[in-house]
Image (cartoon, rainbow, N blue to C red):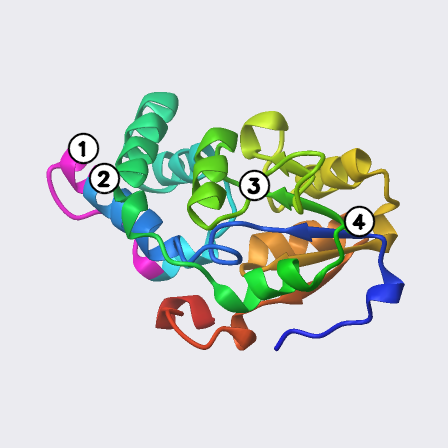
Amino acid sequence: MITFDTSKYDGFIFDCDGTLADSMPLHYRAWKESLEKKLGGPSAFTEELFYRCGGMPARQIIEMLNREHGYGLPVHEFADEKEARFVELLPELKPVQEVIDVVNRLGADAKIAVASGGLTFIVRQTLSLLGLKVGPQEKIKFLIGSDQVLHGKPHPELFLRAAELLGVKPERCLVFEDAEPGFQAAKAAGMDYIDVRPFRQTGLHDAAKY
C-alpha cells in the first residue's frame, strides 16, 4: 500500500501512463509497430530507451530520434500515426490498481489533477476506461495534457499548471510518477513526489525498473 502524510499536502497530482494506467507496454507496442512500418525495419528505439523517456511528449521523442539517428520523420504526422495506433490498442488497457486505490482513498474534497505527457483527449479516454472521470464534481478535478503546455517533462510546466488550476502552492503538492523525466519535473517544480514503481505488484516490465 502507498502511504503518506496527507496533512503535508493540499494538492495531489498524478501522472497517467505507467502510474494510473498500465499503458506503457501498449505505448511501446504502438511506437515499435509505427516505427517499423515507417522505416521498413527495426528502429533504434529500444524498450529500455522508451522507458527512460517515460512522460515525454511524442513530439520530443521523435525529435530526439531524428536528431540522434537521422530518421527524418515528420514530427507531427508521425506523432499522429503513433497515437492512432495506441488508441486502437486501448481496449487491452489494464489499471495500476495500487495507485487507483490512492485516488479512491483521498476524500471527496481532495484537490486532485492528472498531468500527463500524453495528448489530453487520449489521456481522457484512458482515464475513462479506468472508470475515472474528470470534472468539478469528480475525484479528478483537472486534466493537463502535453498539448496544453509549451514544454513537456522534464520541464516543470505541466505540474506547475496543475498546481495553478488546483489553487495550491507547488510546495504543497505531492506528485505520483513512474519515470525519471517526471521525477525531474516534480523536483524542478518544488514538489515532493512518490515513485510508484516499487508499489506495483504486477505488470511492471523489467525495462521500467531502472
Residue shown at the point (75%, 51%) measured from the top left = 108
Label annotation for residue 109:
4
Instruction: Name the one closer to the observer, 185 or 89.
Output: 89
Residue that numbered label 2 is attached to: 35
Of pointers 4 and 1, the one earlier in the residue sequence: 1
Q: Nearer the viewer, mark 1 or mark 3?
A: 3
Helix, strand or loop for disc 1: helix
Q: Is residue 174 magenta?
A: no
Q: Nearer the viewer, mark 2 or mark 3?
A: 3
Label annotation for residue 133:
3
Residue shown at the point (63%, 28%) measured from the top left = 149
Instruction: Name the one closer to the observer, 187 or 148.
Output: 148
Of pointers 4 and 3, the one earlier in the residue sequence: 4
Label annotation for residue 5:
none
Residue that numbered label 1 is attached to: 38
Q: Amino acid at mark 3?
A: Lys
Of pointers 2 and 3, the one earlier in the residue sequence: 2
Helix, strand or loop for disc 4: loop
- Separation of marks 2 and 3 at Cα, in angstroms: 32 Å
Q: Callout 1: 10 Å neighbours few (<14), some, many (20+)?
A: some
The answer to whether the residue labelled 1 contacts the one labelled 2, judged by CB atoms less than 8 Å apart, is yes
Of pointers 2 and 4, the one earlier in the residue sequence: 2
Give coordinates of residue 24: x percent, y percent. Answer: 39, 54
Magenta-colored span: 34-47
